[in-house]
Image (tube, rainbow, N blue to C red):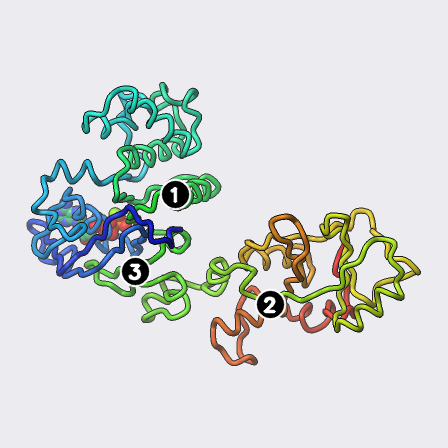
Amino acid sequence: MSQTSTATGSEIVFADVVKRYPGQGRAAVDHLSLTIPAGRIVTFVGVSGCGKTTSLKMINRLIEPTSGTITIDGRDTRSLDADELRRRIGYVIQGGSLFPHMTVGANVAVVPKLLGWNKRRIARRTDELLEMVGLDPAAYRDRYPKELSGGQQQRVGVARGLAADPPVLLMDEPFGAVDPITRTHLQDELLDVQAQLHKTIVCVTHDIDEAIKLGDRILVLQDQARIAQYGTASEILTNPADDFVADFTGGGSTLRRLALERVSSIELESAVLVRGGDPVARVLAQARERGTNQVVVVDGRNHPVDWYWTNTLRGERVQVRPGRQPILLDEDATLDAVLDALVTSFHEGALVVDHAGEFLGVATFDEITRFVRRLSAEPVDESPAEGAQRPGEIEGESRPDGAGQEPSC
Ligand SMILES: Nc1ncnc2c1ncn2[C@@H]1O[C@H](COP(=O)(O)OP(=O)(O)OP(=O)(O)O)[C@@H](O)[C@H]1O
Ligand SMILES: [Mg+2]
């Protein structure tokens, strides 16, 4: 995500914004004040009808506020021409909402055309964007929306929103109604695009996991767009402002927190690195000297190929056992991925390697458990965090001292 200072996006500020729809007693948005920083993704979450779409549409004046002010880079949006404003702000809504009578290419090109770009520039930009959202331009450019799947239409919608390279992109449930795999893929694409372009993106979603994954900051809204909490994913998950936010983020917030942390956040256990054929007696002496009971067998490029506890080493020479390739995790792996690997493999540790595949250390259940306890700041003997709790294995049958099963199978 965009953590750099090279933001090309614009800062958006809501000051005391109210929206009262005609004939409605209650305001849909009641005095919303909020700063959306330039170059960041802010996600809006909240229950249905709480005012997310209304708030979003007031930014590009598809809906006019009843009172209060919205500024973009310090300029009151009311001082800007509404059409001009909408051209400068990309807008993506659920389902892509493409023009059915226009080809995919023409749909993407709508705003550049309005801006008077020449044909060559439009064609180049259209192809570039289709590629960016993972659609082969040659195969898709001349199709009509009805010839695309729902997920593909949504991608075209995202491409169209980005077409004129607007500093601000508004997205209303842009990935709703697609299957979880396509959704994950589209989210990843958006994050990749954002890492390059540093726009200000405001994204409305019902899905707290999506909000956490995409948002540099998350705005949790209550009825009438009252702010329940506005903060980073870590802040919201670790210190929910009140019961409403805690309920909204729901159970499993510790696991979600793990999804935000890299394996570099925990201490890795060291191991003695050996080669197949090394004398076992020497390896054991080395392990004693280093104070570790882990032995990792590496090949000529320092890539792990097998893994032992010291008390499971047998015979005179270290063997590389066929079919015993240990689980390897990249140094960028998130802690929930580590936990997932450990749970599904029934190992209590996994080997972490760097980008070149060289061994860095062993990520253990114990360390993740410790990390989770620090996170939730709970006393150690009280309800350890979910997910890290595998009593039988941590405490008993599978212990790091090698009394249980072997680390590798
Ligand atoms: N055109 C309208 N006229 C009258 N009331 C409206 C209008 N549009 C929305 N509302 C009301 O304003 C409130 C906020 O609606 P809004 O569409 O902003 O909610 P939302 O948070 O986007 O909900 P959802 O998650 O269901 O999309 C709701 O109570 C809704 O009924
Ligand atoms: Mg809505």
406 vs 112: above or below: below
Residue 213 appears at what percent x and percent y? 42, 53
Amino acid, disc 3 = Val
Identify the mark nearer the N-term, 2 or 3.
3
Amino acid, disc 2 = Glu
297 vs 237: above or below: above
SS category of the residue bearing label 2: loop
In three-dimensional space, the C-alpha distance between marks 2 and 1, rounded to whole angstroms, equals 31 Å
Number of disc labels: 3
- The reply, left or right, for residue 109 in relation to residue 315 is left
Identify the mark nearer the N-term, 2 or 1.
1
Identify the mark nearer the N-term, 1 or 3.
1
Q: Of the numbered discs in the image, which one, if any, rests on residue 196?
A: 1
Query: Residue at coordinates 85% horizontally, 62% vertically from top-left?
Result: 313
Residue 130 appears at what percent x and percent y? 38, 29
Residue 400 appears at what percent x and percent y? 72, 69
Given this view, does label 2 or label 3 mark the residue nearer the observer?
2
Pick whichever, 68 or 247, lies toward us: 68
Query: Residue at coordinates 18% horizontally, 51% vertically from top-left?
Result: 73
Q: Cβ(mark 3) to ligand 1 < 8 Å? A: no
The residue carrying mark 3 is 220
Q: Cβ(mark 1) to ligand 2 < 8 Å? A: no
Image quadrant in which you'd find residue 172: top left
